[in-house]
């Protein structure tokens, strides 16, 4: 197998808001066609990092390279990157179908192509029956699926998903996890997904990064992170872990 190609290089990126350092010198490579998960406790900088990748925030330090080129000055709508917001950000006055079609209409694609792509994605996300409703007439999980459909239909090279499955019940969540994996293979999109759910990262991610206080603690395959957590915080955050106090000696660990 040939070496995986780097799609996005995050190089010593920092972002502060006044005195708060939201992202603190993070370096990461995201590979082409990878399913990459970002994990960490609330407030550790996950959304801020995604917003910088999408172009909604500018880093105070560091560089973000796409295919080797610096995209710091590229506005969001000129990046082949799409962000699905944590808060959905649906257009309230527009139907589900219109919400999903909007991005393709902005690209001025032929009406026939828009229709067939929107139909396909509505079917995938089980939204056909709701196509004519407004967001306020939907449940939280349904809204979340509209936001997902709207992001996927554009077929970006890099799709950033901020807790995309958080509002779904367990059954739908499991189905959408498989669906996202399938879609990713089918359309060849690189995914970066923020999740609070450790199990979800195991099911879905090729590699994952664990953040704390804006810093990167560990980046590896889920298996490696579970088997060899970088420190106690990662171990505690990732898994059902038992800590046994002990002292390391030449003869092994003494309880
Ligand atoms: N616009 C802003 N102005 C000031 N502080 C901000 C701003 N956006 C984020 N922060 C702060 O930066 C830190 C990181 O926030 P961020 O939203 O990236 O966290 P998160 O990891 O996405 O958390 P959650 O899991 O709760 O969504 C937090 O301390 C937050 O309060
Ligand atoms: Mg967030």
Image: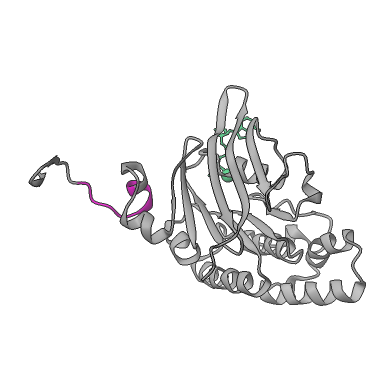
Ligand 1 image-quadrant field:
top right
Q: Is residue 63 left or right of residue 207?
A: right
Residue 236 painted magenta: yes
Residue 101 painted magenta: no
Colouring? one colour
The answer, for residue 163, to whether it is visible in the render is no
Q: Is residue 4 left or right of residue 66?
A: left
The residue drawn where x is 7% and y is 46% is 251
Q: Of residues 96 and 68, which is closer to you in this image?
A: 68
Where residue 156 appears, as percent x and y from the top left, is: 73, 61
128 above or below 196? below
Where residue 204 appears, as percent x and y from the top left, is: 50, 65
Q: Of residues 194 and 174, which is closer to you in this image?
A: 194
Magenta stretch bounds: 235-243
Q: Of residues 54 and 32, which is closer to you in this image?
A: 32
The residue drawn where x is 57% and y is 60% is 165
**Residue 141 sits in quarter:** bottom right
Outermost residue, front side: 2
Q: Of residues 4 and 87, which is closer to you in this image?
A: 4
154 above or below 128? above
- Which quarter of the image is occupied by the C terminus? top left
The residue drawn where x is 37% and y is 57% is 224
109 above or below 128? above
Q: Is residue 138 left or right of residue 216?
A: right
Where residue 34 appears, as percent x and y from the top left, is: 57, 62
The answer, for residue 123, to whether it is visible in the render is yes
């Amino acid at each position: 197998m040939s070496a995986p190609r780097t799609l996005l290089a995050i190089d010593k990126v920092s972002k502060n808001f006044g005195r708060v350092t939201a992202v603190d010198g993070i370096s990461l490579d995201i590979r082409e066609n990878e399913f990459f998960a970002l994990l960490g406790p609330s407030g550790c900088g996950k959304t801020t990092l995604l917003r910088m990748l999408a172009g909604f925030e500018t880093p105070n330090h560091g560089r973000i390279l796409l295919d080797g080129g610096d995209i710091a000055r590229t506005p969001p709508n000129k990046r082949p990157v799409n962000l699905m917001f944590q808060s959905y950000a649906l257009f309230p006055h527009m139907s589900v179908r219109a919400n999903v079609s909007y991005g393709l209409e902005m690209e001025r694609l032929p009406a026939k192509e828009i229709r067939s792509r929107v139909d396909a994605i509505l079917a995938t996300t089980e939204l056909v029956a709701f196509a004519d409703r407004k967001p306020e007439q939907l449940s939280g999980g349904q809204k979340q699926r509209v936001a997902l459909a709207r992001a996927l239909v554009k077929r970006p090279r890099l799709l950033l998903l901020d807790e995309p499955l958080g509002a779904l019940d367990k059954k739908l969540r499991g189905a959408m996890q498989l669906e996202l994996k399938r879609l990713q293979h089918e359309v060849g999109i690189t995914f970066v997904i923020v999740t609070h759910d450790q199990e979800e990262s195991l099911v879905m991610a090729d590699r994952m990064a664990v953040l704390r206080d804006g810093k990167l603690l560990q980046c590896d395959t889920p298996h490696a992170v579970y088997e060899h957590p970088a420190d106690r915080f990662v171990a505690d955050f990732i898994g059902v872990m038992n800590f046994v106090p002990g002292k390391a000696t030449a003869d092994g660990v003494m309880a």
